[in-house]
Image (cartoon, rainbow, N blue to C red):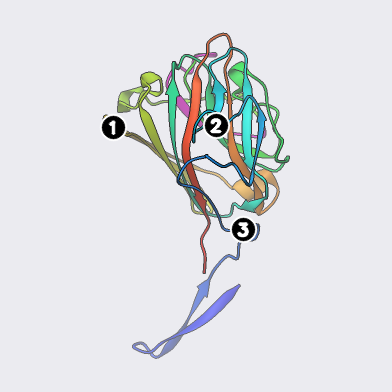
C-alpha cells in the first residue's frame, strides 16, 4: 500500500510505501517461561524446573523444538533471546522460521532438531564439529538442510558457545538482509554477521511459525532459552 503525505516546507506531496504484516505483531517472553501459553513444546523441550525453556536437558541423542502456535509476520522483524549452554559439548540449537507447522521437529545429533523441516530458514548455534565446522560456529540454513557446513567460525571474536556464559542474540530482518549480533553477557565480547535472503520466498508465505530447535548426540548439553521477544513493525 501507498500513502501520500504533504510536505509544507517544500510545497509538494511525497509517497510512503509500507508493508502490512498479518499473523500477529509480537511475541513476549521477556520475563522468561514460567508460563508457556501460546507455545507448542516438542520432543525433549521442557520448562518444568524453572522459568527457563530447555531444548535439551543433558541426556544424549535428544531432539527438541518449540514454536509459537500461530503464524506471525516474517517480512521484517526484530527478535531478541538470551540463552545459556551448560555442560556444553554437543550438539547445538537453532532459531528457526518455518511453514511446516507448530509440531515440526528434526533429528538429533548434527541435525540440531532442524534437518528435514521443509520451507524453513534457520540460524544455528553449533558447538560440536560434525563435518569440520568447529565447536563454535553459526550460519544460515534453509529447507531443513543439514546445518553443518558451510559455517562461520565465531572463535576469533571471543564469543565461545562452550563457555557456559549467558549470551544475548539480537536478530533483525529488514526484508532483504538477515543480521545477527551475538554478545557474551559475561565478557561483553560480540560477534556479528549478515546474509542476504528472501525469507518469505523460502518459506512460501508472508507469515510462518517461529521458534527454536535443538539437539544432543553422542555428547550432551543443557541448552536453555532464558527469555525471548519477537516484534514486527507496527504502523
**In this view, the mark in front (3 or 1):** 3
The answer to whether residue 153 is above or below residue 194 is above
Residue 26: in magenta span? no
The answer to whether residue 57 is above or below residue 188 is above
Dot 3 or dot 1: first in sequence order is 3
Q: Is residue 205 left or right of residue 87?
A: right
Residue at point 49%, 32% (across, down): 50
Location of residue 59 in the rendering, given as x and y in whole percent from the top left corner: 57, 14
In this view of the protein, which residue sits in the foreground, 49 or 132? 49
**Residue 152 shows in the view:** no
- Rendered image: mark on residue 94: 2
For disc 3, the marked residue is 24
Count neighbours of disc 1 (C-alpha within 10 A) and say few if under 14, some if 14 to 19, many if 20 or more: some
For disc 1, the marked residue is 189
Location of residue 212 in the rendering, given as x and y in whole percent from the top left corner: 57, 35
Q: How many marks?
A: 3
Magenta residue span: 129-143
**Residue 191 shows in the view:** yes
Disc 3 vs disc 2: Cβ atoms closer than 8 Å? no
Q: Secondary structure at mark 3?
A: loop
**In this view, the mark in front (3 or 2):** 3
Amino acid at each position: 500500500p501507498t500513502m501520500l503525505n504533504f510536505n509544507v516546507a517544500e510545497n509538494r506531496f511525497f509517497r510512503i510505501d509500507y508493508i502490512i504484516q498479518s499473523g500477529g505483531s509480537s511475541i513476549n517472553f521477556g520475563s522468561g517461561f514460567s508460563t508457556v501459553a501460546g507455545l507448542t513444546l516438542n520432543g525433549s523441550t521442557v520448562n518444568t524446573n524453572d522459568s527457563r525453556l530447555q531444548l535439551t536437558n543433558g541426556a544424549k541423542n535428544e531432539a527438541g523444538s518449540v514454536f509459537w502456535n500461530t503464524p506471525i509476520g516474517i517480512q521484517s522483524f526484530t527478535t531478541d533471546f538470551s540463552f545459556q549452554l551448560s555442560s556444553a559439548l554437543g550438539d547445538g540449537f537453532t532459531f528457526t522460521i518455518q511453514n511446516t507447522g507448530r509440531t515440526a521437529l528434526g533429528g538429533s545429533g548434527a541435525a540440531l532438531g532442524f534437518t528435514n523441516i521443509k520451507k524453513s530458514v534457520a540460524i544455528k548455534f553449533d558447538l560440536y564439529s560434525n563435518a569440520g565446522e568447529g565447536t563454535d560456529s553459526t550460519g544460515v540454513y534453509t529447507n531443513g538442510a543439514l546445518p553443518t557446513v558451510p559455517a562461520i567460525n565465531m572463535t576469533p571474536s571471543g564469543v565461545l558457545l562452550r563457555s557456559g556464559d549467558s549470551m544475548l542474540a539480537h536478530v533483525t530482518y529488514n526484508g532483504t538482509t538477515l543480521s545477527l549480533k551475538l554478545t557474551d553477557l559475561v565478557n561483553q565480547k560480540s560477534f556479528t554477521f549478515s546474509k542476504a535472503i528472501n525469507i518469505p520466498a523460502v518459506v512460501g508465505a508472508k507469515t510462518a511459525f517461529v521458534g527454536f530447535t535443538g539437539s544432543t548426540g553422542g555428547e550432551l548439553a543443557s541448552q536453555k532459552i532464558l527469555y525471548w521477544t519477537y516484534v514486527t513493525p507496527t504502523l
